[in-house]
Each structure stands twice: as structure tokens, then as C-alpha cells.
Image (cartoon, grey):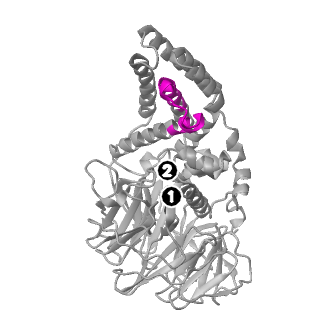
């Protein structure tokens, strides 16, 4: 399957097969549904343009996640650059507390991005340690260690909150 | 909580799907890209197709970036006053300074203090300080005595690197001053004296490395300056970008340590002897039978007692989840491992009381060492400590524990625990 026509069919098939999991990966990595939609589009645009160069040395999923990781990293770098251009004042930069504050998706924001991505693939997507390592381009040991740290961090950070992690914790 | 429990808990998130409207939009963009390629005649992945695709993507990313509104407010600090109130709340963390005096952060980011050993707590949250659940507002507290405390607050909002503001008091929370640091990140804070303190701000976005900023104050928190930049910028050559950082500690204003985890087969440790300006990377000996392969060892912030003695905890992600307390008797020049404490699969939480007394718990038992971690004795507490997130001891016998947000206290080294902090 080569050329624009072949790539178009491939992109359509890949979109049908992988769009949802890539969307979840981007959305929970970035904490933004609208940005995640843009990320998914960018991933498929890049995949489409590079289809002829996709050699099949890795699986389609691994290839798409590799693209997604880079696009997400670019997006985070842009956010970071934007932040460094701003002067800071905590209160003024904070929107009104949103309703998501104690929901599951909100709790992922407590994790650094690397831990968050391992958590997404291992816990939410239920991928094996080996698959997670392949999709993130890391070793299986790294995946196990990072997941352990992610879970520990969630437990620690949410210890006093009125969540499932600390539901029985009320003093009153 | 094991991984299967977590999967059950987070199952609903696995049902999220790309919205149909977005799917249609992507299909349209792909067709548009295909059309551009065909019109250009460039065929298989040619440059015109790439330019068309890149232009669409760049436009989308630019729109996403423009949707952020910049913060143009100025750093400021001003005094505030408040009345002390009673508190009844779940606890997120505690910092007991003596058998009677301590500070705490509540589950919603409230600040409280006790003068009766944790029996009652008074809310002393600074007026106007952002509050919220731990995943919307990060609150870090440091205290040197019952009067002096500092709070680093980072309100997440839509930011991955939230701006950090410091609140500080010298009268037990009756009045607070506020200082914007001008910097952003996930904060950790330590104060050595009532004037000298440090803030470590985590960037937390790299893979196998992590940008950090180290800030210092010499006037009690009113003004902060960046003394170390571990961010990956072209101008920056600091070595401290490497590895994920767990925290830091300072012996004095000059000698400090950064701790954490990296993929190399060694324990991550950065050392400064000039207040954070420059760093070196010493090699720590590994305990017999343990290795640091693939990032399976993580150093934690050190504790110092006097000018020479210190304790450096190192966690190993091996079967049993052991923790090893390294000791120094020469101001941190050399560190020697002691006997690994096996948590039976649950990494123990610990309280380093002195150079010799360390108390730890895996939620099932209490472990006590009175010789700096060489030998350990265990005992069975009278209540279940499952869900334990913190222990804090001020002696080998007097201690506190946070279990699922509840505060428990012991006066006999952890055999008997009673619930505290139920308010006035």
C-alpha cells in the first residue's frame, strides 16, 4: 500500500483502530480533552505523511505511540516556554476551582508526565509491562519502577483527601 | 491497594473515546492533505503533502497555544491577620517539632497547628491562600519552631508548572506575609533557620531526567533567588537535569544534596558545597546483595544532626521493597550503608528521629532501630495501620501516624495507638 491513495486508506484504517486509545493517552497525559483532539490529528497527519517510510520494523501501535509521545512532548515544551515568558503570581493565575478536582481524571494530574503515561498504559489501558515498555520506548524494569512510584505518589498525595484513597480518613 | 484494584477504580476512564466531531475533523484534514498531495503531483509522501499536513497541524497547535491567557501580575508580598479557629479535618501531612508542638496540612490544604501534642488543632490558614484538594493545590509546609512556619503553595489550575507563592509567619500563624517567588513548578521546601531556606521546584516533564530550579532565601522567605537551574535550556550546563529528583536536603547554607532516581546502575546523588551554584556526583557504595539496575534504587532527602552526623534513606525496588539508611559522620563526605529493612513488599514509611533512632512501618508492624539502622526490632501495633502514609516521631517512644487521613498518636514506641485531632 503506497502513494497518497494507499496512505489514505491506511490512515482511515489506523484512525478506526487506534484513535480512541491515542486520544486517551494524549488526554490523560496532557489533562486536556481539546488539546488531545489536536494531538490525535497531528499524530495521524504525521503518520499519513510518513506512511511510505514506515518500514514495519515495529507494530503500527508502537509506531503511532512513538509519534504521539513526541507530539505530546512538543506540546509540553510549548507550554513550558509559554510559562517562562510569564511573570508569576499564584492566585491570579488560578481559575475558579473546577468540579474535576477530586475525580479520577483529575487525580492523574498529581503525577509527573512519565509516571502518568505508565499509569495510563498499565492501569487504564491494561497493557502488559512488556507492551507498556515497547510503547514508551523504555525497559520493563523502568516501567515497573515508574508504576510503583506513581502509585506511591497517588497514595501519598491523596492521603488526606476525601477520595477513595482516603475515604475512611475523616476525623469528624 | 494493588494494580487490579486500581484498574477497577479507573475503569471508567478506559471508556473515553475520541469525540465523533473530532474524528470527522481529522478525516477532513487527512482528505485535504491527500488532495494537496495529488494536486501537487508529488505522489508518495512528497514535500507538498508534508507542507500541507504540517500547515494544518501547526495551525491547530497555534490555536491551542493562543487559548492560554498569559499572567502579567507582579510578585508581591503583604501582611494579613486572622483569628484562630478550631479545626476538624482529615490530615494530609504533619510536622511535629516537639512532643507538644507541631504543624499540619489538612486534606483541603488548610494549615493548622497544635500545642497539646495533636489533641486539638487550630486552623491558621493564611487568608486568601488558594485551597483545594491535593490535585488542585499543592501545599508544602516547613517549620522551625512553634512560631515560625512557611507554606509553599502551587495552585495547579490548568498549569503543569504552577506558579509558587510562599506564605510565612513568625507568630504561630496569627499573621502571615506573602511572597511570590516568580517561579513555577512542584515545590519542596526546607528551612535551616528562621532566615535561611531553600525551595526546590520540579518541572517533571522529561523522560529519565527532570528539570528543577533551586531557590534560596536569606531573609526568612520575603525574597527568593534562583541559585541552581536544572532546566534543559541551551544556556544551561548544570548537571542536575539528569535523573528524576525525589527531594533535597541541606546541612547548612552551603552544603546540600539532591536525591532521586535514574536509569544508571548507581544511586543518584548530587552534592553542592557552594549553596547550590555548582554540583558534583559522588558514588555511593551499594549494600551487599542489592543493585540499582535500571533505576531500581531511589535516594531520598537526607537528615542532619549537628554539623557531622547525617542519615540518607535509599529505597530499592526489589522484591520485599527494602530500604537502607546510609549514615555519615563526616558532614556527608562519605556515606556507608546499614542493614536493609525489608518492608515485606510494602515500602516502609519512616521517621528519622536522630542519628541513632529511626522508626519505620510498612503498615503492618513498627520497626525501631536505636543504632542508626544497623539493627532493627519489630513490634505489633494494637490497631491496623493499613493505609499508613506518614509517621513522625520526636523520640523512640513518642510518635504520630497518618492512616487514611486520620491522626493517631503513641507514647510507647508504637505498641498502642489512639486517635487524635478530633477538634475542640
Please tell me whether residue B358 is drawn above or below residue B47 in the rendered image: below
Judge left or right: residue B245 versus residue B16: left
Provide residue A157's location: percent of width, then percent of height: 57, 61
Give the mark, 1 or 2, whose residue is nearer the N terminus: 1
Report the chain holding disc 2.
B
Taken as a whole, is the magenta stretch helix, strand or loop? Answer: helix
Mark 1 neighbour density, 10 Å: few (under 14) some (14–19) many (20 or more): many
Query: For this rendering, which residue is in front, A26 or B395?
Result: A26
Query: Residue A61 falls in which quadrant of the image?
Result: top right
Q: Are marks 1 and 2 in contact (CB under 8 Å)?
A: yes
Query: Mark 2 — residue?
Result: B156
Query: Mark 1 — residue?
Result: B138
Q: Residue at the spot x=61%, y=22% of the render?
A: A12
Q: Residue at the spot x=36%, y=54% of the render?
A: B183
Q: Which residues are magenta?
A: A40-66
Mark 1 falls on what kind of element? strand
Residue B192 in sight here? yes
Amino acid at each position: 500500500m503506497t502513494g497518497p491513495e494507499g496512505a489514505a486508506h491506511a490512515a482511515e484504517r489506523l484512525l478506526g483502530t487506534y484513535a480512541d486509545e491515542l486520544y486517551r493517552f494524549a488526554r490523560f497525559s496532557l489533562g486536556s480533552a481539546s488539546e488531545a483532539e489536536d494531538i490525535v490529528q497531528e499524530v495521524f497527519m504525521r503518520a499519513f505523511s510518513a506512511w511510505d517510510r514506515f518500514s514495519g520494523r515495529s507494530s503500527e501501535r508502537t509506531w503511532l505511540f512513538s509519534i504521539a509521545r513526541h507530539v505530546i512532548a512538543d506540546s509540553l515544551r510549548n507550554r513550558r516556554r509559554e510559562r517562562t515568558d510569564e511573570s508569576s503570581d499564584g492566585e491570579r493565575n488560578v481559575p475558579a476551582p473546577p468540579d474535576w478536582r477530586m475525580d479520577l481524571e483529575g487525580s492523574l494530574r498529581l503525577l509527573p508526565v512519565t509516571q502518568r503515561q505508565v499509569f495510563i498504559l498499565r492501569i487504564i489501558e491494561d497493557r502488559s509491562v512488556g507492551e507498556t515498555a515497547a510503547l514508551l520506548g523504555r525497559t520493563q524494569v523502568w516501567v515497573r519502577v515508574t508504576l510503583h512510584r506513581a502509585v506511591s505518589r497517588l497514595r501519598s498525595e491523596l492521603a488526606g483527601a476525601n477520595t477513595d484513597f482516603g475515604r475512611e480518613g475523616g476525623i469528624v | 491497594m494493588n494494580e487490579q484494584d486500581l484498574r477497577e477504580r479507573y475503569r471508567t476512564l478506559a471508556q473515553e473515546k475520541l469525540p465523533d466531531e473530532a474524528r470527522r475533523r481529522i478525516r477532513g484534514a487527512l482528505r485535504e492533505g491527500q488532495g494537496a498531495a495529488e494536486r501537487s503531483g508529488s505522489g508518495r509522501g512528497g514535500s507538498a503533502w508534508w507542507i500541507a499536513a504540517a500547515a494544518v497541524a501547526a495551525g491547530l497547535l497555534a490555536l491551542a497555544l493562543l487559548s492560554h491567557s498569559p499572567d502579567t501580575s507582579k510578585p508581591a508580598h503583604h501582611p494579613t491577620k486572622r483569628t484562630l479557629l478550631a479545626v476538624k479535618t482529615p490530615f494530609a501531612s504533619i510536622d511535629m517539632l516537639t512532643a507538644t508542638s507541631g504543624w499540619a496540612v489538612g486534606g483541603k490544604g488548610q494549615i493548622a497547628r497544635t500545642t497539646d501534642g495533636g489533641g486539638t488543632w487550630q486552623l491558621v490558614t493564611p487568608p486568601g491562600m488558594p485551597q483545594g484538594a491535593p490535585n488542585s493545590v499543592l501545599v508544602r509546609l516547613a517549620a522551625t519552631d512553634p512560631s515560625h512556619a512557611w507554606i509553599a503553595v502551587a495552585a495547579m489550575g490548568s498549569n503543569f508548572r504552577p506558579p509558587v507563592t510562599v506564605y510565612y509567619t513568625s507568630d504561630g500563624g496569627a499573621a502571615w506575609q506573602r511572597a511570590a517567588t516568580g517561579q513555577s513548578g512542584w515545590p519542596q521546601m526546607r528551612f535551616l533557620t528562621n532566615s535561611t531556606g531553600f525551595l526546590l521546584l520540579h518541572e517533571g516533564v522529561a523522560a529519565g531526567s527532570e528539570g528543577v530550579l533551586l531557590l534560596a532565601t536569606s531573609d526568612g522567605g520575603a525574597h527568593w533567588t534562583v541559585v541552581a537551574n536544572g532546566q534543559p535550556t541551551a544556556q544551561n550546563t548544570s548537571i542536575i537535569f539528569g535523573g528524576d529528583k525525589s527531594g533535597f536536603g541541606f546541612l547548612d547554607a552551603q552544603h546540600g544534596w539532591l536525591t532521586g532516581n535514574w536509569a544508571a546502575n548507581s544511586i543518584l546523588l548530587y552534592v553542592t558545597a557552594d549553596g547550590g551554584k555548582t554540583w558534583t556526583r559522588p558514588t555511593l557504595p551499594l549494600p551487599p546483595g542489592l543493585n540499582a539496575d535500571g533505576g531500581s534504587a531511589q535516594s531520598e532527602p537526607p537528615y542532619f544532626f549537628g554539623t557531622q552526623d547525617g542519615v540518607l534513606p535509599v529505597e530499592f525496588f526489589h522484591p520485599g521493597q527494602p530500604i537502607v539508611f546510609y549514615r555519615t559522620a563526616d558532614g556527608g563526605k562519605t556515606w556507608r550503608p546499614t542493614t536493609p529493612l525489608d518492608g515485606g513488599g510494602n515500602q516502609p514509611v519512616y521517621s528519622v528521629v536522630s542519628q541513632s533512632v529511626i522508626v519505620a512501618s510498612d503498615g503492618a508492624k513498627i520497626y525501631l532501630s536505636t543504632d542508626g539502622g544497623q539493627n532493627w526490632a519489630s513490634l505489633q501495633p494494637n490497631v491496623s495501620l493499613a493505609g499508613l502514609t506518614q509517621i513522625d516521631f520526636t523520640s523512640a517512644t513518642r510518635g504520630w501516624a497518618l492512616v487514611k487521613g486520620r491522626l493517631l498518636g503513641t507514647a510507647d514506641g508504637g505498641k498502642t495507638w489512639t486517635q487524635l485531632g478530633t477538634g475542640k
